[in-house]
Image (spheres, rainbow, N blue to C red):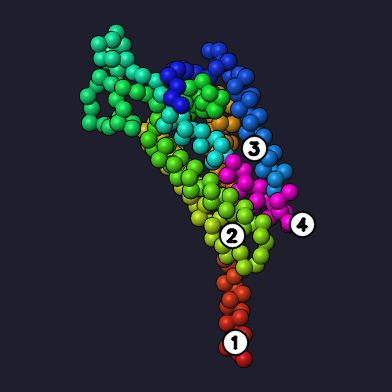
């Protein structure tokens, strides 16, 4: 459903207000997904379960929920929420629809502006709130959208598949578990780099670091999680690969002696 309603800022957030009702509800929704991932991991993993497996399962289930629910809603609004741009003869001239450039309009629609900024749905309000720290998430940024297509349709299902492998707890699944966890963790870190590197290289015009919440909570904590945790997963995977090679060398050495 297309929504022709333009929202210039987060609702329930008067000018100058740092913490609004939308802020609180967005953070509670985030914490709810954390709670669901923890509770479902306890229920789904066979007992007994070691702490490392529990943490890995919880992270990948949480990762799936974030990519599917949060970021899936971003893609929805990027493609289906829009506002009509005024005609060239209006008093609002010049506007994007009337300016002839070599750049292609998003979805080849010169008379529309897409993104969460043009919707009043709850998930759109969530992205309008985050866009107070990074304005790209309230509109159509093709770099972000390209990354999110891969994140939602590949990384999300892959995270869920890793949860399935961890639930099996068979030794024959160990190689598949660590291989796919390595693939996903590498993709997460690369995706984070490609999200922010173009912005940094152009002077970060879309980032608002003017206060502690935007900088440390929205930008550093929420994005840093997808660097630190995947980095930890890669460190664990390296240990597994190293141990496997050591065992292989021992077996090979034993065969030569015999």
Q: Residues within 10 Å of mark 4 (few under 14, many from 20)?
A: few
Q: Which residue lies most toward the front here?
A: 1
**Residue sitting at x 61%, y 64%:** 174
Give how far apart the Cα atoms at labels 3 and 4 are.
23 Å
* Horizontal arrangement in the rendering, residue 225 relative to residue 198 (left or right): right
- Is any part of residue 207 visible from this angle? no
Tell me which segment is drawn in magenta: 43-65
**Residue in the image at 28% along x and 10% along y:** 90
Let me know if residue 98 appears in the view: yes
Residue denoted by label 1: 255
Crowd tier of the residue under label 2, counting other residues whose Cα lies within 10 Å: few below 14, some 14–19, many 20 or above: some
- Disc on res. 177: 2
Q: In the picture shown, does residue 97 fall above or below 52?
A: above
For image coordinates 36% across by 33% down, the residue present is: 202
Relative to 141, residue 6 above or below: above
Q: Which residue is mark 4?
A: 47
**Cα distance, mark 1 to mark 3?**
51 Å
Q: Which residue is mark 3?
A: 33
Find residue 83 and report its horizontal and vertical position in percent: 39, 20
Give the crowd class for mark 1: few <14, some 14-19, many >=20 residues within 10 Å: few
- Of the numbered discs 3 and 4, the one sitting upstream in the chain is 3
| Image quadrant in which you'd find residue 112 | top left
Asked if the residues shown at circle 1 and circle 3 are in contact, with their CB atoms under 8 angstroms apart, the answer is: no
The mark closer to the camera, 2 or 1, is: 2
Mark 1 in CB contact with mark 4 (< 8 angstroms): no
Badge 4 element: loop
> Considering only order in the chain, which callout, 3 or 1, is on the residue closer to the N terminus?
3
Mark 2 to mark 1 CA distance (whole Å): 29 Å
Q: Find numbered disc 3 in the image and state the secondary structure of the residue it sits on.
A: helix
Q: Residues within 10 Å of mark 3 (few under 14, many from 20)?
A: some
């Amino acid at each position: 459903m297309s929504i022709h309603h333009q929202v210039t800022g987060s609702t329930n957030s008067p000018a100058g207000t740092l913490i609004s009702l939308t802020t609180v509800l967005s953070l509670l929704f985030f914490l709810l997904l954390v709670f669901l991932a923890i509770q479902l991991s306890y229920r789904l993993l066979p007992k007994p379960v070691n702490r490392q497996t529990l943490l890995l399962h919880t992270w990948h289930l949480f990762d799936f929920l974030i990519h599917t629910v949060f970021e899936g809603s971003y893609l929805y609004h990027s493609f289906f929420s829009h506002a009509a741009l005024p005609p060239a003869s209006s008093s609002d001239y010049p506007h994007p629809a009337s300016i002839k450039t070599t750049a292609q309009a998003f979805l080849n629609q010169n008379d529309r502006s897409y993104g969460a900024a043009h919707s009043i749905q709850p998930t759109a309000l969530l992205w309008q709130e985050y866009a107070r720290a990074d304005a790209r998430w309230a509109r159509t940024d093709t770099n972000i959208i390209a990354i999110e297509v891969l994140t939602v349709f590949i990384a999300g299902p892959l995270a869920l598949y890793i949860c399935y492998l961890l639930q099996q707890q068979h030794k024959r699944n160990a190689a598949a578990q660590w291989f796919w966890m390595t693939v996903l963790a590498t993709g997460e870190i690369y995706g984070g780099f490609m999200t922010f590197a173009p912005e940094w290289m152009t002077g970060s015009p879309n980032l608002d670091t003017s206060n502690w919440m935007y900088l440390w909570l929205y930008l550093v904590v929420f994005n840093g999680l997808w660097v630190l945790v995947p980095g930890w997963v890669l460190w664990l995977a390296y240990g597994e690969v190293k141990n496997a090679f050591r065992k292989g060398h021992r077996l090979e050495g034993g065969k030569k002696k015999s």
